[in-house]
Amino acid sequence: MSYEKVMQAKKLSVGTKEATRTVEAGKALEVFVAKDADPRITSKLVNLCKRMNVPVTYVDSMKQLGKACGIDVGASVVAAVNE
């Protein structure tokens, strides 16, 4: 399951702004997007990932994605960072 990938990642960029910067810098290995996140927030990043050839994986919920990152709030987008 993709949550395991999130938990195994050594470094994460949590949130749309951080994840976008990571992708633009060419450092994102994979981006995880919560299915229940607002598409107005996530669509620009998903399109950027397509242009930059970064794989996008959809996960069930913001709550579970946040939990996988070790935070107490939901996360709409998380990028696994290549250090």
Image (tube, rainbow, N blue to C red):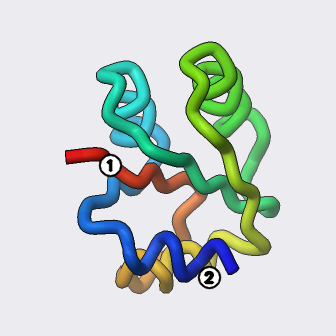
Find numbered disc 2 in the image and state the secondary structure of the residue it sits on: helix
Instruction: Judge left or right: residue 22 versus residue 36.
Output: left
Find numbered disc 1 in the image and state the secondary structure of the residue it sits on: strand
Q: Tag 2: residue type?
A: Gln
Please provide percent x and percent y for residue 47: 69, 22
Give the residue displayed 63% in from the left and 40% down from the top. 55
Give the residue displayed 67% in from the left and 44% down from the top. 56
Residue 8 drawn above or below residue 55: below
Q: Label 1: few (<14), some or many (≥20) within 10 Å?
A: some
Residue 60 drawn above or below residue 39: below
Residue in front for this viewpoint, 38 or 6 = 6
Residue in front for this viewpoint, 81 or 13 = 81
Choose top left, top right, bottom left or bottom right for residue 82: top left
Residue in front for this viewpoint, 39 or 45 = 45
Choose top left, top right, bottom left or bottom right for residue 34: bottom right
Please provide percent x and percent y for residue 9: 36, 68
Label 2: which residue? 64
Q: Tag 1: residue type?
A: Val
Instruction: Judge left or right: residue 64 versus residue 6.
Output: right
Label 1: which residue? 81
Please provide percent x and percent y for residue 71: 37, 80
Give the residue displayed 34% in from the left and 40% down from the top. 18
Please provide percent x and percent y for residue 1: 69, 80
Q: Which of marks 2 and 1 is in front?
A: 1
